[in-house]
Amino acid sequence: MRTNFFQAIQRLHSTGVWIFNVSFSTENEVVVSVVVKDGGNRDDKNTLPPMVYRGTPQEIDEGIFDALVHPIEETKNLFANLTAYNKGLEDAKAKIMVKPKIEKSADKKGATESIHESTEDRPKFEDILSEINKLNAGCKYSEALALLPVVESFPEKKAEIEKLRKELEWKSKQLTLL
């Protein structure tokens, strides 16, 4: 018996890891589920729901690869967009990070190092808040949350930061319900 199963899979040439599960529900019916995971990440958070196909063995043989073409193409695009989104999120977080400036000062007992936050390196709270408000207005709550500074960077704005974080998290959760 000769099949071209793996050649057909290779023609679909998708990124990620594929998991095929075949079960037999009745005497003449086969259930095939295909799970596609993002190959770049080892965690399960980037796992999509399985694609499930039911039919006789002959129906599955004749139609499984035609049925997979469109979902696999969409999955490729989804993983590419997810990777680009995560990279953009990391870049945005890196811009917000405050870099400490090390200055050496000498005293009578010897030289000691002290760490001071450089105010010229740190973005102004108002600028960050303006960017967050733009993202909030565009319903991009996750991106706005990523830009939200940590309280340690602006301890004088602790109440405002926490209030804004709660508001953005609530709005973000509301979108997931839709």
Image: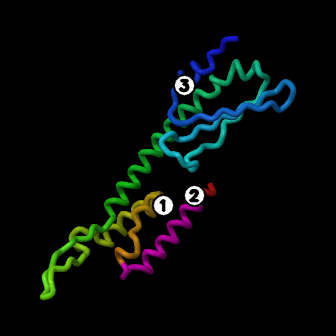
- Where disc 1 sits, the SS reads helix
Residue linked to disc 3: 12
Q: Position of residue 30 (x, y in %)?
A: 78, 28
In primary-sequence order, the first of circles 2 and 1 is: 1
Residue 125 placement, left or right of 146: left
- Residue at the image point whose x is 65% and y is 15% from the top: 3
Residue 138 versus residue 100 in the image, above or below: above
Residue 141 versus residue 100 in the image, above or below: above
- Where disc 3 sits, the SS reads helix
Residue 29 placement, left or right of 61: right
Front tag of 3 and 2: 3
Image quarter where the N terminus lies is top right
Residue linked to disc 2: 175
Which disc number belongs to residue 141?
1
In the depicted view, which residue is nearer to us: 53 or 24? 24
Q: Position of residue 114 (x, y in %)?
A: 22, 78
In the rendered structure, which segment of residues is drawn in magenta? 155-175
- Residue at the image point whose x is 35% and y is 74% from the top: 153
| CB-based contact (under 8 Å), mark 2 and mark 1 | yes
In the depicted view, which residue is nearer to us: 75 or 32? 32
Residue 79 placement, left or right of 23: left
- Where disc 2 sits, the SS reads helix
